[in-house]
Image: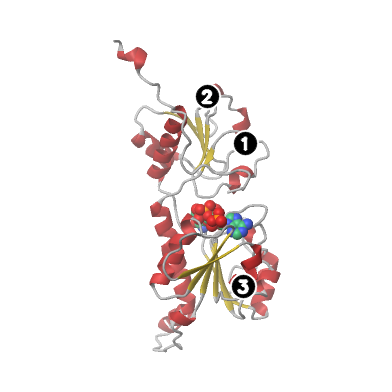
């Protein structure tokens, strides 16, 4: 038999983002599938060739103009950058990346963020810079309760690690959890939110951004936390009502905030959060998705669809995450 007539054609994949370059992702796709037909950025060629779109912030409306598209693949854990497009073809499978390495990166960041405030590291850094040997009061981690809003793939990994280093951990999710890591207490739904918040000396936001969770971190919520709580936002910038943060810090309702995500990124010069010693800012680096994992998961999802199977990590668009 002539192999040229039976070989499956290489898939055609578009790498789409308005805000970041896709060159290293293209290399990962070529490594995962030599001979792949890649269309990058504005150089899309014939739109009818494209089987799958791998997206960060694609140009609005573009996905709806790809007539043979079979898969929309987010290159991250979140998908809010895709559902923000009113023209998103909602009948197509939309998948996100779920990966142990990404969970490990988030776990390391969240443990660092909790420990650096709970153990008084800003004061130690200032002492060291002034060549001063100065011990800070010690608070046993057993008496510092950490709450994680969002017990998904990332939140559960963070909860397990924080419990393993001695913190009493509680988590809040939409639905009840049948099993939780050892040392983690579960809360769910709006009926249990206040009880959850009342025991969060540090609150970590690891929710997806949906219409229900937008603005979740606001003045009313801060008032339900123990006085002097530390807020860590590693979800999305729009989880936080930014205008409510500085007043909560000024009143002492919050003592500190560690923020990795912002409504506008990069955080603009002159923003009042810059330079405030109570706020530690990182530029959306809490974790990263491995490029090769994105390529492998995209190709596996496309192959599953071609076999008539459900792809992995398909988002429930009704639920919003
Ligand atoms: P998952 O979808 O696995 O988990 C989401 C969790 O949030 C679930 O426990 C879910 O509850 C809960 N949840 C959703 N809606 C509600 C609600 N209305 N009320 C209460 N709980 C709710 O997400 P991941 O863990 O993979 O990722 C979480 C988020 O982390 C991403 O969406 C993204 O925004 C952010 N992220 C940030 C990064 C960074 O570098 N800063 C990198 C990667 C992700 P249930 O279990 O009942 O479904």
The picture quadrant where one finds residue 271 is bottom right
Residue beneath the point at 45% across and 78% down: 121
Name the quadrant where ligand 1 sits.
bottom right
Disc 2 versus disc 1: nearer the observer: 1
Q: Earlier in the sequence, mark 3 or mark 1?
A: 1
Question: Image quadrant for the N terminus?
Answer: top left
Residue beneath the point at 39% across and 73% down: 165
* Mark-to-mark CA distance, 3 and 2: 55 Å
* Residue corresponding to mark 2: 45
Q: Is residue 82 above or below residue 159?
A: above
* Residue corresponding to mark 1: 90
Q: Secondary structure at mark 1?
A: loop
The picture quadrant where one finds residue 149 is bottom right
Q: Residues within 10 Å of mark 2 (few under 14, many from 20)?
A: few
| Residue 189 position within the rendered picture, expressed as x and y whole percent measured from the top left | 62, 61
Disc 3 versus disc 1: nearer the observer: 3
Labelled pair 2, 1 in contact (Cβ < 8 Å): no
Q: Secondary structure at mark 3?
A: helix
Q: Is residue 25 above or below residue 258?
A: above
Q: Is residue 171 above or below residue 76?
A: below
Q: Which mark is residue 195?
A: 3
């Amino acid at each position: 038999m002539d192999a040229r007539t039976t070989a499956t054609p290489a898939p055609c994949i578009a790498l789409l983002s308005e805000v970041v370059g896709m060159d290293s992702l293209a290399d990962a796709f070529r490594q995962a599938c030599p001979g792949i037909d890649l269309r990058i950025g504005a150089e899309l060629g014939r739109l009818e060739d494209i089987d799958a779109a791998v997206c960060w912030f694609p140009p609005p409306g573009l996905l709806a103009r790809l007539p043979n598209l079979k898969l929309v693949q987010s290159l991250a854990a979140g998908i809010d950058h895709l559902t923000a497009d009113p023209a998103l073809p909602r009948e197509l499978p939309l998948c996100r990346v779920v990966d142990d390495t990404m969970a490990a990166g988030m776990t390391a960041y969240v443990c660092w963020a909790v420990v650096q405030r709970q153990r008084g590291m800003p004061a130690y850094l200032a002492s060291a810079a002034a060549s001063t040997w100065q011990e800070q009061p010690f608070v046993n981690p057993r008496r510092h309760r950490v709450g994680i809003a969002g017990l998904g793939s990332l939140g559960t990994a963070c909860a397990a690690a924080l419990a393993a280093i001695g913190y009493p951990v509680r988590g809040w999710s939409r639905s009840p959890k049948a099993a939780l890591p050892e040392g983690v207490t579960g809360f769910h739904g709006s009926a249990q939110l206040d009880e959850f918040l009342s025991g969060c000396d540090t609150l970590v936001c690891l929710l997806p951004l949906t219409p229900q969770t937008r603005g979740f971190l606001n003045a009313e919520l801060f008032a339900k936390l123990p006085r002097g709580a530390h807020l860590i936002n590693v979800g999305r910038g729009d989880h936080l009502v930014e205008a409510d943060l500085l007043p909560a810090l000024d009143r002492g309702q919050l003592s500190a905030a560690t923020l990795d995500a912002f409504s506008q990124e990069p955080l603009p010069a002159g923003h009042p959060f810059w330079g405030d010693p109570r706020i530690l800012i990182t530029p959306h680096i809490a974790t990263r998705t491995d490029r090769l994992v994105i390529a492998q998961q995209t190709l596996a999802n496309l192959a599953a669809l071609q076999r008539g199977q459900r792809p992995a990590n398909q988002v429930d668009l009704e639920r919003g995450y």
